Amino acid sequence: MKLAVPDMISNSYFPAIAAAQLGFFRQEGLNVEVELVFPVDKAYAALRDGAVDFVGGSAHSALAAFPEWQGVKLLCAQAQGMYWFLVMHKDLGIKRGDIAGVKGRSIGAAPWVEMGLRGLLASAGIDLVRDAVKIAPVPGALAAGVNFGVTAAKALEERKIDGFWANGMGTEVAVKSGAGTVVLDVRRGDGPAEAFNFTMASVAATEKLINERPEAAAAAIRAITGAHAALRANPEVAETIGRKVFPANEASLIADLIRRDLPYYDATITPGFVKGMNAFCQRLGLLKSTPSYEDVVATQLSPLWRGTGS
């Protein structure tokens, strides 16, 4: 079986990567290979077309291939909350939490990821046209794929962009290089509170797989919760995994990033999250209807989120 992620050298989808590298999928009877499919809309298209069995990506992006949530469901969360950071060039002198600092600036972001930033800025009263904010792909990132955030950090350092909206790994590289400063970290309270529930790192499968192979869907959830538990017990194992799949510099950073993410490692997908995500998607024109919680989430498997199901 295959699980697609849209970014490999990242902390964003590390629970899925760890579940494979630490043998939790095998332990559950699944032979799962984690495969890079960038950008995330292509990952969900691969799920729709049967090229992969699971997607470990941003939850809202399922709508790229499954309009109105028809034919797909979220199995579990990899972590809670919208997980991208707004990083701006240090020389601009924009302070933490100063959303107005984006006015007149160019910000790099990946397809579908950028929607989170658009929604956040709209919630904060920023109009992209009026305030001359340009959000566009990071130069060279579509070819890089495997390390979007790291490519964004390099583009920032070279002043090809004023800032970027990307994962924690890219953020860490940019900050440590001295080029970047964190302006918004939604998970940790920056920006409009509603933005926390715009999306999350999740694992999704088709309704067909869930109906025809419920044991495989359940096994995937148990593998993710197993990886959560292993990383909580020993965050240092993240570096061991990183040395297998990341370049040396990023491998040296991953354990610290995972340590910071541990408070958000909860496989639960709440009705409140789905309500917030639906409202975000409706405002962006991605969703016309108001799907129920059960329309979006494989609720029959929810006991597995807390390890209480079999």
Image (tube, grey):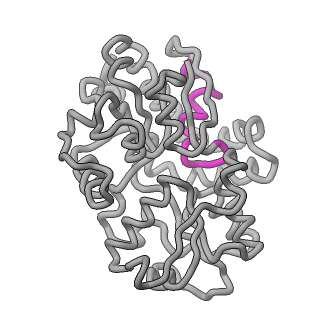
Q: Quadrant of residue 119?
A: bottom left
Residue placed furthest toward the front: 129
Disc count in the image? 0
Q: In which quarter of the image is residue 74?
A: top left
Q: Is residue 140 above or below residue 17?
A: below
Q: Residue 116 location, x and y as percent?
A: 42, 60
Q: Residue 229 location, x and y as percent?
A: 49, 34
Q: Residue 194 location, x and y as percent?
A: 29, 64
Residue at 71 percent of width and 73 percent of height: 160
- Left or right? Give the position of 52 relative to 193: right
Q: Residue 137 location, x and y as percent?
A: 60, 61
Residue at 56 percent of width and 81 percent of height: 105
Q: In this view, does 1 lie above or below 101?
A: above
The part of the chain drawn in magenta is 8-25
> Which of these two is toward me, 224 or 144?
144
**Per the image, is 268 magenta?**
no
